[in-house]
């Protein structure tokens, strides 16, 4: 039998640990919402923080050469004078058919605006049945349907209006010359408990809103930060200069918002520079102020009789407050348990140089598992299913298809300075004239433990907990091609494996 032409071996993004992996591992960057320590800007930069909330939204900004001077955007357009100088604006919008008419404080009191639409970025199966049927949620759906717009478009309209107002405010503060030569870096907040598809919808809305429109000063960059982390950084900034703060102190921060309540816990690693790490996986739930409003509305509609009013009011608050108390208890209990458990990993060393006034989150806890689908040598006696067995011409051997390599699992530490790396390769025929860059899919899974195979009896868990339309992609270029000769050996009997 004639030997086949030599095959050329080159690294690719199939996550395989193998002796045949001949190059240095290519970096697989875990998808991040926002970098802890962004690279030094090449030009003057205006950093804009946009808190898009369920009931109220706000904007703050700072100039890169004066990062500690953080300014709030106010002077909102308003029907009432006493609203214009507030730090936040209502997350509400009024439509005339499909066209936006008013937003924020400018909506007349006798109109019915579209509110709470942020919650509609979630699918019904990610909200409890009770919440799906809340009158506020039902009214929002009905008003949204009347506009003829989908929820992503409505979010884009609102973000566009708040962005235009923010840039006008920044222009007045800095002047046209400095604004024109400065790039924008925009950071938008996200609820920590949101699944990946909801984050992708919010990112799409931000792209549609005009925030990333081209400017002569350079590209506008977009980042995201979990809402509890943003709240924590603001709180820690106030704590940083207190003499009572010392290393190994732990704090729990509760961010009780309009739609969600998020909790996050940090342990202080050092005070100068001020470095913290997330010590347990954050928690949260849909138990924000809008659901308290719903309970109060139910009380007004349904409660009658001679019972003392105080008891009635307590029953209104109890369901929501009990959920918040449970979240706080779970978080503090997790910290105590974590102190006595096996260490999840080595403590990441601090960076050599920090801005003394900055707050650095050194380590975070993975909320989900991340991995890639790959092919490896078939070994039925060990772990592989016969249904996954395929003959691979490039390897001249039986291989197992649709295997999952979870290079980051839920609960693992994520260092902001040490990215996750995996060795892998891919084989190509020598007669291929041109090799294109590789684009590989990174899957996100909320099931724990994540399934071993992509198309196994664990497929149901994969379908329940991941959205194949929301995939993070990593592109790599080829370098340092390595060669070895593969002989044609014929197809062996797979039963001998």
Image (cartoon, helix red, strand yellow):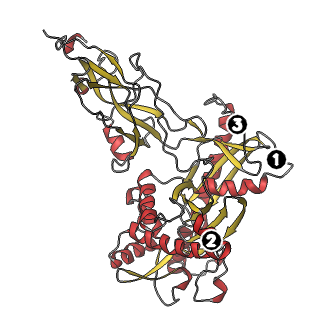
Residue depicted at 56% across the width and 62% down the height: 184
At mark 2, the secondary structure is helix
Residue situated in front as seen by the camera: 210 or 5: 5
Q: Quadrant of residue 46?
A: bottom right
**Separation (CA) of disc 2 from disc 3:** 38 Å
Instruction: Identify the mark at residue 350; answer none if there is no mark.
Output: 3
Q: Does label 3 or label 1 sit earlier along the sequence?
A: 1
Q: Position of residue 103 (x, y in %)?
A: 50, 80
Q: Is residue 218 left or right of residue 460?
A: right
Instruction: Identify the mark at residue 245; answer none if there is no mark.
Output: 1
Residue depicted at 35% across the width and 38% down the height: 437
The label nearer to you, 2 versus 1, is: 2
Residue neighbourhood size for the residue with mark 2, other residues' Cα within 10 Å, grouped as few (<14), some (14–19), many (≥20) = few
Q: Is residue 264 left or right of residue 205?
A: right
Q: Is residue 101 above or below residue 199?
A: below
Q: Which residue is mark 2?
A: 177
């Amino acid at each position: 039998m004639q030997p086949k032409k030599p095959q050329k071996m080159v690294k690719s993004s199939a996550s395989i640990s193998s002796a045949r992996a001949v190059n240095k591992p290519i970096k697989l960057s875990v998808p991040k919402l926002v970098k802890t320590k962004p690279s030094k800007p090449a030009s003057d930069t205006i950093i804009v923080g946009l808190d898009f909330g369920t009931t109220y939204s706000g904007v703050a900004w700072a100039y890169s050469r004066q990062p500690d001077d953080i300014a709030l955007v106010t002077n909102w357009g308003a029907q009432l004078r006493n609203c214009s100088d507030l730090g936040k604006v209502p997350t509400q919008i009024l439509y005339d058919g499909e066209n936006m008419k008013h937003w924020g404080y400018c909506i007349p009191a006798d109109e019915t605006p579209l509110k709470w639409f942020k919650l509609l970025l979630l699918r019904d199966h990610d909200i409890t049945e009770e919440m799906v049927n809340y009158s506020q949620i039902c009214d929002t759906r009905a008003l949204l349907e009347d506009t003829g717009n989908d929820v992503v478009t409505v979010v884009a309209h609102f973000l566009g209006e708040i962005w235009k107002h923010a840039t006008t405010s920044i222009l007045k503060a800095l002047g046209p010359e400095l604004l024109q030569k400065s790039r924008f870096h925009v950071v938008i907040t996200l609820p920590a408990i949101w699944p990946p598809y909801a984050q992708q919808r919010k990112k799409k809305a931000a792209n549609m809103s005009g925030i990333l429109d081209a400017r002569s000063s350079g590209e506008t960059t977009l980042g995201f930060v979990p809402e509890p982390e943003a709240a924590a950084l603001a709180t820690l900034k106030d704590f940083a200069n207190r003499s009572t703060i010392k290393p190994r102190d732990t704090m729990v921060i509760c961010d009780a918002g309009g739609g969600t309540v998020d909790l996050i816990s940090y342990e202080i690693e050092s005070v100068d520079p001020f470095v913290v790490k997330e010590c347990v996986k954050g928690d949260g739930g849909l138990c924000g102020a809008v659901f308290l409003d719903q309970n109060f509305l139910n009380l007004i509609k349904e409660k009658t009789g001679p019972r003392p009013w105080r008891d009635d009011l307590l029953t209104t608050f109890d369901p929501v407050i009990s959920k918040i108390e449970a979240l706080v208890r779970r978080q503090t209990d997790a910290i105590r348990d974590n102190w006595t458990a096996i260490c999840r990993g080595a403590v990441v060393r601090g960076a050599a140089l920090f801005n003394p006034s900055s707050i650095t989150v050194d380590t975070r806890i993975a909320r989900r598992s991340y991995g890639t689908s790959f092919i490896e040598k078939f070994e039925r006696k060990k772990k592989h299913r016969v249904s996954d067995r395929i003959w691979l011409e490039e390897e001249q051997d039986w291989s197992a298809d649709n295997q999952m390599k979870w290079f980051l699992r839920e609960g693992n530490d994520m260092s902001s300075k040490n990215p996750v790396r995996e060795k892998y390769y891919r084989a190509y025929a020598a007669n291929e004239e041109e090799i294109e860059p590789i684009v590989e899919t990174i899957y996100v899974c909320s099931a724990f433990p994540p399934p071993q195979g992509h198309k196994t009896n664990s497929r149901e868990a994969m379908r329940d907990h991941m959205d194949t339309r929301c995939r993070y992609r990593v592109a790599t270029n080829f370098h340092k091609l390595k060669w070895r000769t593969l002989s044609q050996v014929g197809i062996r009997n797979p039963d001998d494996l």
